[in-house]
Amino acid sequence: MSDHTVVDAASVDPAMGRFRKMRLALGTNAFGINQIELPPGSQGPEHDEAGTAHEEVYVVLKGAGVLSIGGQDVELLPGRYVRVAPQVSRQVTAGDEGLVFIAIGAPIRDDWTGRPTL
């Protein structure tokens, strides 16, 4: 495998018309990453990640919407990052302009804190 991979999201066919499986396209196995594109007013599936123990981070690229997390609504805006624990139910709803966001997930590791300089 090469020491880097470049993938344009537009070149990745969306699964179910909405989920661009970027992890597969990039060939990474350290974390999952998908780009999700929701039309205005549509919703993603309500789910949790208890079965995978994946902590997820959502980052909005374009548009706006709401992320319902365990019954609490968090506004999704470009540049906003939202972390959700594995066991908590979540559901994304796109606003009037639609919503494009990425979801990044990986199992929680209590022993990992990253480099102290970052």
Image (cartoon, rainbow, N blue to C red):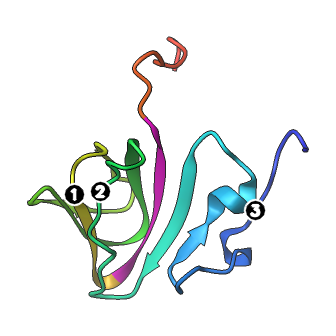
Q: Amino acid at mark 3?
A: Val
Q: Is residue 97 magenta?
A: no
Magenta stretch: give its range: 98-107
Mark linked to residue 89? 1
Badge 3 local density, few (<14 within 10 Å), some, or many (20+)? few
Question: Which residue is identified by label 3?
Answer: 7
Give residue 12's position: percent from left, percent from top. Answer: 70, 74
Mark 3 secondary-structure assignment = loop
Q: Residue at x 55, y 55 (%)?
A: 33
Residue 92 picture quarter:
bottom left
Q: Amino acid at mark 1?
A: Ser
Mark 1 secondary-structure assignment = loop
Q: Can the viewer see residue 82 in this picture?
A: no
Residue 95 picture quarter:
bottom left
| Number of the front mark, 3 or 1 | 1
Give residue 39's position: percent from left, percent from top. Answer: 39, 87
Question: Which residue is identified by label 2?
Answer: 48
Q: Amino acid at mark 2?
A: Asp
Left or right of 83? Residue 11 is right
CB within 8 Å, label 2 to label 3: no
Give residue 40's position: percent from left, percent from top. Answer: 32, 88
Real-space Cα distance between discs 2 and 3? 28 Å
Left or right of 4? Residue 42 is left
Q: Earlier in the sequence, mark 3 or mark 1?
A: 3
CB within 8 Å, label 1 to label 2: yes
Give residue 66's position: percent from left, percent from top. Answer: 22, 68
Q: Residue at x 38, y 61 (%)?
A: 78
